[in-house]
Image: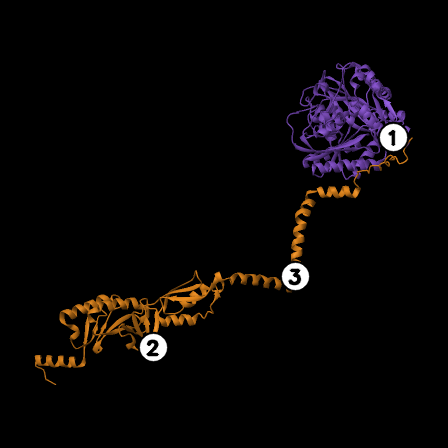
Chain colours: A purple, B orange
């Protein structure tokens, strides 16, 4: 844990350095595309005061000055599959974004969806020494949480305090300075496969970039796709990506659950490719132009030229009706939604006061999804697009860029995590003298 | 049936080249975006190249000389345009003698470019002549070098052991003259240091107006006071301080008692409160004889 702590603190320091320099890149490593945005920080922010436990990491207003996306290569299920290919794709995106921004970027914050994230809820409590809660007490209570067995080769990606309780009062946003006897905390920890992180770090390092932060794309896409009251009242955000579908549940502006279904839009494309005997590129094109999930009588008559380049005239002139295409797409989309439903059931989404579900991500643009999803997920479903941020080009405002935009917000307004607080002072040996002195004072 | 010459489907398009930059290209691009490198390349390098090229070119002495000579040729070509040429010299306000002297002093080959004329040096050269009080040189439009001269006006002659000089009102030498007869109209000064006190001498001479016919000249005595020398070796010794008043006193005496007509050699006014007279030898003897007669002493 200490190793992770120092590593994450080093990333925070890197982020501070990037804010000093005023420019940072964000990198969304997805299965279907790799996006890079270059942000310029304009100075301390005023309007978004505090999320959660104050603002330890420092916040800033920002502006997007460079944006580039490239076809992803070598990434499957949100994990790096062929490292050289991925490195080249990252280089392409970063170089194009740098060129647009006309500035050199050295620090990058990255997100990815793979690594099979797992959520853990942690609780800890301590007795307060001085009567009122100090920053050191917050650090102590965070350190007092029992670490569950997260398994071999797993690493903590997020560790956010989501709730503080002081004596019998719960739901405190910021306990610092308040009077009480016993402070307890609920912490949400998201762990991912350490090999996935290491591969990604290696790829970024090969591009001469310094990592200033890592995030799960399920988390950051919900940061941008959920509106503020949804984050406050409780909502689930489903990020339909290319290779994986991320799920995160928000409550009181904190992520309380995150998970990933390893199915996505690429599987739909693969189904079309297999079903129609066409190459993946053609299948992708057919899906994008004619895809849907609700067949109507009109669709029986709408014939789609499949095309082909084999030289066999019969083969190259095949057509397929749109309802046949929908018949291929729909079962796969239903499967993804049912997987998500089962994850929501596991997470206990039924017990939340608000049942809002927001669909985002590139695959959420299938026409008719807003009619299909309520049948499986529940009534309150909407298709969400990311927040508008300053300077974002029109071409990257689509729902496929929810995690990119969310990563911008994450870069500018990170929530406080465990490593933003200092290591509790009583773990230092020097502290024992003070304790001994206190013991003497109390007993004589 | 298909025509045999039907156009075959276009050859499958080559797989689109991966647009990913190579590692080297990526690094070079990042390097290029570094502000320092950018500045150096865009400003530093061209400046360096230009300076370097210029330095290499000039380093060779032949080339340097060629550049210098071409620059000078160009300069000459401009200077020798007819607009800048001076064709003749006009000297105004000078007597023929001085005119000649000035022309000999400045032997200029006309026509000459006005850029080659060093007017200030020429002016100081001409002004070095004693006879010149002020000289103005200018190049008039039309290519005429105009020398405007004001000569010193001689007001007095000064005889020294070696020569006879003409002096102006300030005591500055004007010219040497061969004989007193050359300028009989000017009064004569003599004695060491007389030229330093010409204004005072002129004041004395003005005061001595009634003596004009008999005046021979003034002599500076011991570089501190004046003697007025009259015909017949009569002298009026004037004091240092107020020579003009003393002279006027003598003139008043002369008017009243016809002093100067008497047989006196010296009228000593060095102490103005106590004028002293020295009679000539014969006058003294005559006075004694008359006194003897009056007193009834033995006649000699």
In the picture, which quadrant includes the N terminus of chain A? Answer: top right
Residue placed under numbered mark 3 in the picture? B59
Residue drawn at (72%, 22%), measured in percent from left and top?
Answer: A128
Residue drawn at (88%, 29%), measured in percent from left and top?
Answer: A316
Q: Are marks 3 and 2 on the same chain?
A: yes
Which label sits on residue A308? Answer: 1
The percent coordinates of residue A198 (x first, y second) are 82, 34
Residue A244 seen anywhere in this rendered image of the structure: no
The percent coordinates of residue B208 (x first, y second) are 22, 69
The percent coordinates of residue A155 (x first, y second) are 82, 29
Residue placed under numbered mark 2 in the picture? B163
Q: Secondary structure at mark 3?
A: helix
| Chain label for disc 1 | A
The percent coordinates of residue B87 (x first, y second) are 45, 66
Q: Secondary structure at mark 2?
A: loop
CA gap between label 3 and label 2 equals 64 Å
Q: Tell me the mark number nearer the camera, choosing from 1 and 2.
A: 1
10 Å crowding of disc 2: few (<14), some (14-19), many (20+) = few
């Amino acid at each position: 844990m200490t190793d992770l702590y120092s590593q994450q603190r080093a990333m925070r320091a890197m982020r501070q350095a990037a804010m000093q320099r005023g420019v940072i890149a964000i990198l969304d490593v997805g299965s279907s595309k790799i996006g890079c945005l270059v942000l310029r920080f304009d100075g301390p922010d005023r309007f978004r005061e505090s999320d959660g436990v104050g603002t330890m990491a420092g916040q800033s207003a920002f502006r997007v000055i460079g944006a580039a996306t490239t076809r992803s290569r070598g990434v499957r299920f949100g994990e790096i599959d062929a490292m050289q290919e991925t490195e080249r794709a990252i280089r392409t995106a970063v170089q194009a974004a740098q060129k647009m921004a006309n500035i050199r970027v050295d620090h990058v914050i990255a997100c990815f969806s793979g690594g099979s994230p797992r959520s853990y809820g942690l609780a800890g409590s301590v007795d307060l020494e001085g009567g009122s809660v100090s920053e050191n007490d917050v650090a102590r209570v965070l350190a007092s949480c029992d670490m569950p067995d997260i398994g071999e080769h797993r690493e903590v990606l997020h560790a956010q305090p989501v709730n503080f309780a002081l004596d019998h009062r719960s739901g405190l946003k910021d306990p610092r300075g308040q009077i009480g006897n016993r402070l307890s905390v609920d912490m949400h920890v998201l762990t991912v496969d350490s090999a996935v992180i290491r591969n990604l770090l290696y790829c970024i390092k090969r591009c001469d970039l310094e990592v200033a932060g890592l995030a799960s794309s399920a988390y950051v896409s919900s940061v941008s796709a959920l509106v503020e009251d949804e984050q406050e009242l409780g909502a689930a955000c489903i990020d339909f990506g290319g290779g994986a579908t991320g799920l995160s549940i928000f409550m009181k502006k904190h992520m309380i659950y995150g998970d990933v279904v390893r199915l996505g839009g690429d599987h739909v494309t693969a189904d079309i490719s297999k079903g129609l005997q066409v190459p993946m590129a053609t299948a992708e094109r057919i899906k994008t132009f004619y895809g849907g999930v609700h067949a109507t009588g009109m669709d029986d008559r709408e014939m789609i030229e499949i095309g082909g380049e084999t030289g066999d005239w019969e083969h190259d002139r095949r057509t397929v009706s749109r309802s046949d295409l929908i018949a291929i797409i729909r079962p796969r989309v239903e499967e993804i939604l049912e997987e998500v439903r089962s994850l929501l059931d596991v997470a206990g989404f039924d017990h939340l006061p608000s049942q809002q579900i927001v669909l985002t991500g590139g695959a959420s643009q299938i026409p008719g999804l807003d009619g299909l999803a309520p049948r499986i997920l529940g009534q309150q479903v909407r298709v969400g697009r990311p927040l508008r941020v300053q300077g974002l080009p029109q071409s990257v405002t689509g729902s496929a860029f929810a995690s990119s935009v969310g990563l911008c917000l994450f870069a500018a307004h990170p929530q406080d995590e465990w490593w933003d607080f200092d290591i509790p002072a009583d773990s230092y040996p020097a502290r024992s003298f003070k304790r001994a002195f206190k013991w003497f004072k109390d007993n004589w | 049936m298909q025509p045999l010459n039907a156009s075959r489907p276009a050859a499958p398009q080559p797989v689109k080249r991966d647009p990913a930059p190579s590692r080297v290209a990526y690094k070079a691009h990042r390097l290029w975006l570094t502000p320092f490198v950018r500045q150096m390349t865009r400003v530093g390098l061209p400046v360096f190249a230009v300076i370097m090229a210029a330095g290499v070119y000039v380093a060779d002495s032949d080339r340097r000389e060629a550049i210098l000579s071409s620059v000078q040729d160009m300069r000459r070509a401009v200077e020798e345009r007819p607009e800048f040429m001076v064709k003749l010299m006009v000297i105004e306000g000078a007597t023929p003698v001085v005119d000649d002297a000035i022309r000999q002093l400045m032997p200029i080959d006309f026509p000459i470019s006005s850029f080659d004329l060093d007017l200030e040096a020429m002016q100081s050269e001409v002004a070095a002549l004693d006879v010149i009080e002020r000289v103005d040189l200018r190049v008039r439009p039309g290519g005429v070098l105009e020398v405007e001269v004001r000569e010193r006006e001689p007001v007095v002659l000064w005889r020294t052991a070696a020569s006879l000089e003409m002096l102006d009102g300030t005591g500055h030498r004007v010219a040497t003259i061969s004989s007193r007869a050359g300028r009989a109209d000017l009064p004569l000064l003599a004695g060491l240091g007389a030229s330093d006190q010409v204004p005072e001498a002129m004041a004395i001479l003005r005061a001595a107006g009634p003596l004009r016919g008999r005046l021979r000249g003034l002599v500076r005595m011991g570089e501190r006071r004046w003697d007025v020398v009259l015909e017949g070796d009569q002298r009026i010794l004037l004091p240092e301080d107020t020579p003009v008043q003393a002279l006027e006193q003598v003139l008043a005496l002369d008017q009243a008692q016809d002093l100067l007509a008497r047989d006196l050699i010296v009228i000593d006014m060095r102490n103005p409160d106590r004028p002293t007279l020295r009679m000539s030898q014969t006058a003294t003897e005559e006075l004694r004889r008359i006194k003897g007669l009056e007193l009834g002493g033995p006649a000699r």
